[in-house]
Each structure stands twice: as C-alpha cells, then as structure tokens.
Amino acid sequence: MDRTLQQPSQQPSRRVPALRAVAARTLLAGCLAVALVSAARPVDDEVDPYSKGDPELLAAAGYLSLGPFPWADGVDTEDVDAILGDVTMRWVETPHFRIGSSLPAYRVPNAEKDGVREELKALKQLLPKVNVRTKRLDPWLRLHLYALRLERLHAELCELLGVDDDDFVPATEGGKYMGEGPCLGMPGKPTVLLFEKSSSLGRYRVRFTDQTVDAAVRRLFYDPPSMTFATSIETGKGLFDEDVSLHCHVVFNVTHNLVNSFKYFAYKLPVWVPEGISHWFRRRVDPVWNQFTAVKDNDGPGKAEQDWAVRVRARVGHEYFPAAEELMNWMDYDDLSVVDHMMIWSRIDFLIDQGPDRFARFMDVLKDHPGTVDGLFSVEQVQARQVQALGAAYQLEPDVFDVQWAAWVEATYPKK
C-alpha cells in the first residue's frame, strides 16, 4: 500500500473546466450517460455478454464506455493492456469511476449467496440479461458487480457529505470553494484496478507508479490530479479468494481515496479522519474482514478482532483510551495499533451518529481551501483546522469531545 500520498506540487488553476456529471445519489440506474461513446472489445475480442456492447443498453446502465478510454497521467487503457501482455482486461467507465478487471470467475458460497443475490437484482434492472439466481459470477459479471458497488459507495459517501455532482463547479469570485474539478473536487476521475495475479499488479506498479513496495497501490496521479487504487486477489495471500473479503478491501481503500479527493487533495489529513471513515464504510459491508492502511501489532487484513464496539466500550469503562487532542496529532499510519484503529472508527461512528448535517459541516470546514498562496497546509495548520471544524459543526472542544464520545459509547455499545 502506498501510505504516503504526496501533495500536488502545484495547485491546478481554479479555471479547470468542470464537466457537469450525472446525479450522484442514485445507483447506476439513475445515472444516464451524458455522452454516448463507443464500447470497444477487450484485447481478446470477448464481448460483454450482458450488453453486447449495445450503445442503448450501455447508456441505460449508466455506462459511458467499455473502453478504450483515458486512464491517468497521459496513459489510456490500451497502454495498460500493452504492459500487461496476455492478461485479459475488461474495462468500464461509469459516471464516477474508471475500472479495469482481470478477476476470474467466482463460485458464490452459501454464506455470500443472499447478499450477492440482492446485488444481482439491482444489476438486472440495469442489464436485463443478468441471471439473479446464478451461483457462478463470470469475469464480466464480477466487473459489473464492482461497478455497481463502487457507484453505491460514491452515492452513500456523497449523501454523508451532503453534496452532489452539481456542487463541484469552479468557484466564482467570492463563491464557495469546492475543490479544483468535477470529481468530488479533483480534476480527474478516480480509477480502480482489480487484478487476479500479483504479477499483473507488479507490472502495473513498476511501469506506471513510483511505488517500490510489493503491495496494493493507493496513490495520487498528477496529470490531471486523480486518485487510483490497484490490487490483486493474490495480494490478500488467500484472504481475497472470498469475494466478500475482496469487497471489503476495495471499499476500504476506495473510501480513503474519495475522502482525500473531497474538495481537492490539498493536504494530508490526520489519519483518524480518512481511516476512521474507511473503517465505517467497510464494516457496513461486513464487520468480519478487517482492513488497515498499516497496523503495528497485526498481520493486516483478516478476521481477528471483530467485536470492535465491545472492545471500545471496555476501554472507555476503564478510562483507557487516547484523548482527542492526541489522536488529532496522529499523522503516521505505521504508529497505529489495532486498538487505535478501533478508537478512531468509534470517534467517526459517534460524529456521524450526531446527524448527517453536522458531519457534513465538519468535513466541509476540515477540507476547505487552506487559504495559503501555494494551497498547502503545514501540520500545525491541519491540527488547528480540526479544532475549527469540531467547533463549527458540533460546538466541541477536544476535551469536551472526549467526554461526550465516552458517554455515547457507554450508552450505545454492548458490554459483550
């Protein structure tokens, strides 16, 4: 994982053309394509069996393209295909994502059957050829499911932040700052790559990123500024063989990228905000499959420590937890323990529970323009902005935040 997203060296002009995107708070069914573009076949000439590349079906499903299309940093999907060699990639551009997949077919186990069937019902409304009772997800169907899941995630996050696509337009003189582009405030659309093999991920990482660690990629591209996430089934060392675990992995990391994208990635957030929100969304998919950007006392993703609410309540009962003033100074993921992750998830859980309008206000103030000439923040300014955001949204100072959160935990979370 790329744990150190770099700040852009220069703020793009605020005159970045804002393409008016389709409405954000629906699933793909509510997102008709704003332009009808051609859908080319993938490199092995296999045609999507659910749309057959039909422009009307694609538009009805909310798809803009099945490729080729631009990717990031001057690269397009054909460039990615070329570096991967004989790997069969399938591509789709949705209203809010560009997605590539080489995921293999998947046999749905009984434990996942009900959840997948509900997703297939939603997908069938977009692509009528989908069989909602199938127990085998072919490679194209897996891509369609992840497109559905990512659009759902985007819609739910936008609802939490109190925004829609129409909010991300260039700021007029004296107008409200909402970032530097139409994609939650970023100029470029976020990208997601889902590989089967770690070797494919490695080829992509070496050729198109500066990341040297053999791990999933979460990073910033610069031309235009946009966020990407790339991973593989083999990265999970067996855990991602179960699709529900891979789903949690994707939701956790893409949430990170979307939170950082909101109102533009001008500065690095303190870790409790993006990590806590990512935990909150991931646990809504399945609380079993833990995910961490980094953790110092655990091997990473897995099933350990599922009952976070119980563990947090026990710590609060013994008054043994990091104070808000302390966690607001955490800027390095490598320093966090599993318990630290539980605590930051719970802080976000508390803030969201106080009402979506208040949480939206908190994030709006936190991610507002730094107000500096270069558009960047110092660590001290980031810390001060957190206090400002808590006060504006919740009328809380850090010490009062501790008291009210602890009382809420004891009243809300179970003892066992």
Image (spheres, helix red, strand yellow):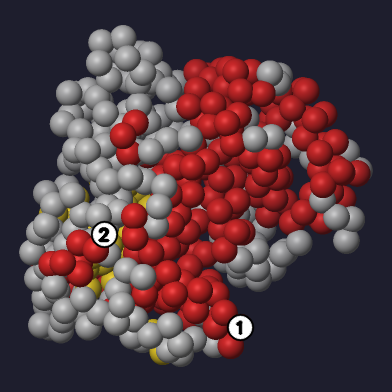
Residue at coordinates 60% horizontally, 51% vertically from top-left? 280
Which quadrant does the C terminus fall into?
bottom right
Q: Position of residue 111 (x, y in %)?
A: 61, 83
**Residue 77 placed where, x, y %?**
15, 63
Q: In screen coordinates, is 394 left or right of 311?
A: left
Residue type highlighted by circle 1:
Ala
The vertical placement of 85 against 345, above or below, is: below
Foreground residue, 3 or 39?
39
Q: Quadrant of the N terminus?
A: bottom left
Identify which residue, 13 or 300, lies in the foreground.
Answer: 13
Judged left or right of residue 111, residue 61 is left
Res. 79 visible in picture: no
Q: Residue at x 67, y 58 (%)?
A: 297
Residue position marked by numbered label 1 in the rendering: 111
Q: Which dot marks residue 62?
A: 2
Q: Using a 10 Å C-alpha cutoff, classify the residue at mark 2 as few (fewer than 14 neighbours), some (14 to 19) or many (20 or more).
A: many
Neighbourhood count class around disc 1 (C-alpha, 10 Å): few under 14, some 14–19, many 20 upward: few
Q: Residue at x 34, y 81 (%)?
A: 130
Whether residue 193 sits left or right of residue 347 in the image: it is: left
Instruction: Give 226 or 414, whichever is nearer the viewer.
Output: 414
Q: Please determine whether, in this image, residue 321 is positioned above or below residue 397.
A: below
Residue 284, x across and y down, in percent: 60, 59
Residue at image point 38% right, 64% down = 148
Q: Earlier in the sequence, mark 1 or mark 2?
A: 2
Task: Kindly give the residue lying farthest to the top in the view shown.
Answer: 174
